[in-house]
Image (tube, helix red, strand yellow):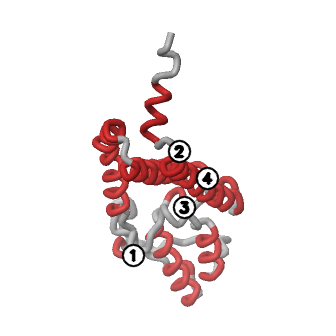
Amino acid sequence: MLEKIASLTTLRNLTGLTRTLVKQGNINALRCYSTKLAPASPKQFSCLTKPITFKNVICPSSAQLKKAIGNSLIQARSQSTHGSHVNLWKLERLVAAMFVPLVPLCLMLENPVLDSLLAVLSVIHVHWGLEAIIIDYARPIVVGHIFPKICFVALYLVSALTLAGLLVLVYNGPGISKVLKQGWTIGKDK
């Protein structure tokens, strides 16, 4: 539940805050300071001027909170240690943009090197797209911890087999561009 409403940085700060409260042994000592929260959203959590008082609340230990948070955050690609996905996003955009000149070149030249590049970039592009789908829809908090792992293993197997099949087509068959041209001529002989 915490994963849906808070960022990873906020969850880490909550873990530290819980550790402090457990050491103090007093839940009434809780004060919210904006510097303790995620830098991206300090205005969402304004500072409290009075202590928060909870009645009949059991404060979990730091280890219990870390375990609960850590178990729900197993998605490696969606969370990095530095929190920046800019380089990956740039690489994804670069791969997508490379298709614009590459596809016409492959169709005009029918070169095995260009066909191999097209095969590798196509598999990478599709792999990243399917990986994003798995991360979005096979979240551990929704489907459990085993199903996402099975999906990721299946994705890597399918990506590897697809790349191997395309490279066999390029080097032991007519090539990707020639197969595409042959596919377009089906039914034009009438």
Marking on residue 50: none
Of the pair 151 and 110, the residue shown nearer to us: 110
Residue type pointed to by label 1: Lys
Query: How much space separates mark 4 and mark 2, taking CA atoms?
Result: 21 Å
Image coordinates for residue 4, horizontal then vertical, percent? 53, 56
For marks 3 and 1, give the one nearer the viewer. 3
Marking on residue 36: 1
Classify mark 1: helix, strand or loop.
Answer: helix
Q: Image check: 177 left or right of 20?
A: left
For marks 4 and 1, give the one nearer the viewer. 4
Q: Residue at x 49, y 63 (%)?
A: 77
Residue type pointed to by label 3: Glu
Q: Residue beneath label 3, please?
A: 3
Q: Residue beneath label 2, please?
A: 173
Residues at badges 4 and 1 in contact (C-beta under 8 Å)?
Answer: no
First in sequence, mark 4 or 1: give its number: 1
Q: Residue beneath label 4, please?
A: 158
Is any part of residue 132 visible from this angle? no
